[in-house]
Amino acid sequence: MSARFKLKPIVLTMMPILFAGSANFALAQDKEDEANKNKEDAELEVIQVKGYRGSVMRSINAKRLSDGVQDSIFAEDIGKSTDQNIADALSRITGVTVQESDGEGTRISVRGANSSLNQISLNGVALTSSLNGGGGGSGQSDQSVDLSSFSSDILSSINVIKTAAADHDEGSLGANVILRTVKPLNVNEDIRSLEIQGRYNDYAEKNDSKIAGSFSQKFLDETVGIITTVSKETSHSRTDSLGGSWLAPYQVVDIPAGGATSQQTGLPTTESQKALMADGRSYSTGLNYRERTTGTVGIQWLAGDDTDVQLDLSYSKASYESDTHRISVSKPNLDTKGNLIDDPQSDWWTVDEESHTLTKTLNRFGSGSLFRGVGGNETENKVLTLKINHAITDDLSMELTAGYSKTDYVTTPNASIGTANWKSTNSNNNLLDVPASELQPVGWDCTTGECILVTGDSNLSFVPQGNANGNDNIGTTGFSPYDIHGHHLGYIAQYNETSDDTNKSLFLDFDYAVDFAGITKIEFGGKVSNRRKVVYTDYQSFSSAEDIVFDERGNTINGVGASDINLVDVLAGQGIPVNDFMGGLVPKDSEYNTDYFNGWGILDPDKAIAEMFAIPNIEAQHNNNGDRDLEQDNVSAYLKFNFEYFDSRLTGNVGLRYVKTENSSFGYSSVNYSNTHGISVPYDLIYKKQLWNENATACAPHTNVGTNDALLYEPWEAPIACYDPNLRYDWGNGAGGGGANPDNWTNDGSFATTYDANGVPIESPWFIHQ
């Protein structure tokens, strides 16, 4: 069906107007819809993921988009961190091993590489380092960075790059660790934060604290921003430990049948056997205190649409104090001072026949000592970075970085002191005739799985006008920690270490975005840097005052030897500064006397030094053998191509880096001369002094302190040529047999010398010809 309509003239006249109105209405409706859409877009809520979830997402994305093997950590909130320092923060990253001290991270190792093989930078500047393992003259001037000096509160991100690339700073075989602080204009909202913590260390029985704050502000229409973060915290720690000898921890000993009790049967052993015997055992407590102050300031300026300027200043200071107390017992030299045949050795020794280890060792001539060491150090770090980013074109950008880093390390006043009793007991020879029933043997008992130190508790009786070597003094034990008169000083030691490490660098980097043959970006640039490290280490041990301390005129100050100072003269007047010493580590209820758990005579190193030299404020003459000055100048340049293929399924980079390094170093060498009649002066002794000439007059004796009761001489003091039979004994083969009787001496001919009537050698010893 169809129908036709005929339009009237008036309708035909109105149609253009109607169509025009309809078109305008449609256009207006489209504009209104677009405006509403823009309004909706403007009012669209933006959801920003923050906090821990946000930091994890940023870490995942950074790892996904990286063209190398990289792990990242982003700050959960600015100025808020659950980690004590940067090293602790890095412990979360796979492949990173953190070295700890007092429960806090210090240095890091990546994929097993030494801590000195990592390149660690803050805002693009390589961090300088202090001494590694400082104290006691053992400081190493490597480039490992002590990250415990920096609070983690100052960081916004950490990147650990484990693969090499041409644009990475050289100097790393482990990883490049890139630390970054906050850019204030990248913060969405201005920061006002304050954190106060109070802590209590139950074991150390000390209170600690932490206060940290962050502040940021934008100015001038958000073209200038500033942010600062500061923190200060303290940390006390206490460590009680059971130790042994690190130099020679064990010795293989022969146990005759019946010479020990079997750990398994509880009966005397029936067969001879070999077993391991510990050289010694010790109890110690270490009281340490750390204080760390860290601050950073960041200033950012958008100088234009294409230029961004960032200035970062970071400062940290870490102080460390330590106080260590130790009581130790040790076995004697069993080859010369083993237990006597009448001693109940099977009661004194217990052997684990499965592990072939002596679990109980008591000895007649066992000895012991007391020790105290006090010291510390201060480390100060200063880092300054100026970074300018400028977009030259839409595709070409430039980054200029100037950096300065400096680390100063210095030890605080320190000393270590140890006791001995070899002089008052003639190395325990006075115990030779003590009946076993009256003797108090010394050693340790670990048969229960927990080691108990076994000491005596009787005091030494000094015999007036007795033998000078202490052989006449009366005692029943080789070590009593309660006998303040029976012990003397064994040694006093001090060390002084400083280091000054400065690094200055300038980087210029370009990024050029391209799109040809799969190449997406070209990176190129260069670097110049200078690094200088000056190290001063000095360790000295005092056994006597001679040849060590000098007055203002350079004359030697003659003091007394360490063995001339009794324990009672250097006591600190206080007990051991901890409660429940070794609590929870060893049993306190024992069949042995363990009063030492309540403390012993605490040593005072300052008193010991004053007693030795009898003058205040002394200083040992500096020994510069450990001093060195190292400087490195570096120039490098690189070119790197980034590529993408197969719809970005294959990405990577290839590059080339040129490095030129010039090193210079300065140090000291030394020669140590023997102070005895050794072979250091054989020509003079044999040719001029004629000490081998049996026809010459015998040299006059100098002292009577030799082993085997033989006379020792100082032949170089003789005014005329003389014959020295003892020197012949020492240099010949007398030590191999014959004892002190010259009639029984033999000689292997190595030192045979024949003199003519005028005392001139006809045949010389072999070493003179050599």
Image (tube, helix red, strand yellow):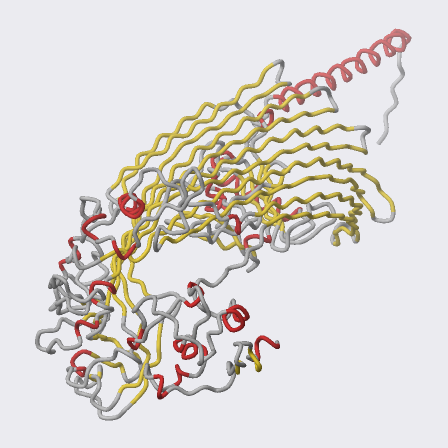
Residue 130 drawn above or below residue 257: above
Q: Quadrant of the C terminus?
A: bottom right
Residue extending farthest front: 757
**Image coordinates for residue 279, horizontal then vertical, percent:** 32, 71
Asked if 5 appears above or below 620 in the picture, the reply is above
The vertical placement of 460 against 311, above or below, is below
Q: At which x and y percent is residue 87?
A: 48, 46
When asked about the image quadrant of residue 426, the answer is bottom left
Q: Quadrant of residue 715?
A: bottom left
Q: Nearer the viewer, residue 416 or 409?
A: 416
Closest to the observer: 641 or 607? 607
Q: Is residue 368 left or right of residue 701?
A: left
Look at 75% across and 43% down and name the residue there: 635
The x and y percentages for residue 118 are: 59, 51
Image side of residue 514 versus residue 149, left or right? right
- Which residue sits at x=66%, y=19%? 36
Residue depicted at 61% across the width and 18% down the height: 222
Q: Quadrant of residue 430?
A: bottom left
Judge by depth and name the residue closer to the eye, 45 or 440. Answer: 440
Q: In the drawing, does residue 741 fall left or right of residue 260?
A: right
Residue 759 in percent (x, y) is at 52, 76
Instruction: Identify the image quadrant of the N terminus.
Output: top right
Residue 552 placement, left or right of 567: right
Q: Nearer the viewer, residue 514 or 225?
A: 225
- Give the residue at the far left of this rendering: 437
- Image point (28%, 62%), residue name: 242
